[in-house]
């Protein structure tokens, strides 16, 4: 079953706080993605883009634009449990 995101909150230093429907809470650090995936580097340079993270209609993916997104299962698997 694909985890569904209940809440997402951008925090300082490119860390996302995420709550899932089943009660899990994680902090996902975007720094490694920014360093290793070229499309993510725009989060450093385009003012306000990082803070404008959005949740798709199915609540199984977050995105910033049509080139930068992350699925909920990745966020849950690699996020640090809170």
Image (spheres, rainbow, N blue to C red):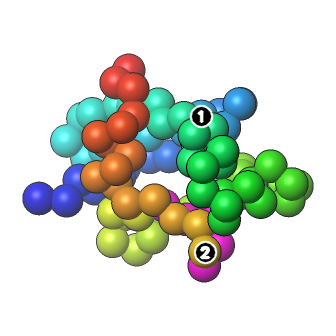
Residue drawn at x 38%, y 46% as measured from the top left: 75
Q: Circles 2 and 1: CB distance less than 8 Å?
A: no
Crowding near the residue tagged with mark 2, few <14, some 14–19, many ≥20 C-alpha atoms within 10 Å: few
The stretch drawn in magenta includes residue 65: yes
Label the magenta part by its dominant secondary structure: strand
Q: Earlier in the sequence, mark 2 or mark 1?
A: 1
**Coordinates of residue 46 in the picture (x, y in percent):** 85, 59
Asked whether the viewer can see residue 17, the reply is: no
Assign the N terminus to one quadrant of the image.
bottom left
Q: In front: 44, or 50?
A: 44
Residue extent of the magenta highlight: 62-66
Q: Which residue is mark 1?
A: 15
Q: Which residue is mark 2?
A: 67
Residue drawn at x 34%, y 24% as measured from the top left: 81
**Coordinates of residue 19 in the picture (x, y in percent):** 37, 39
Residue 37: image quadrant is: bottom right
Q: In front: 5, or 32?
A: 32
The stretch drawn in magenta includes residue 54: no
């Amino acid at each position: 079953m694909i985890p569904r995101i209940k809440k997402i909150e951008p925090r300082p230093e490119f860390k996302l706080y995420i709550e899932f429907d089943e009660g899990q809470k994680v902090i996902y650090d975007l720094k490694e993605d920014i360093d290793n995936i070229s499309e993510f580097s725009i989060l450093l340079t385009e003012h306000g883009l990082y803070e404008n993270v959005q949740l798709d209609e199915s609540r199984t993916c977050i995105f910033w634009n049509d080139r930068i997104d992350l699925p909920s299962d990745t966020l849950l698997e690699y996020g640090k449990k809170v």
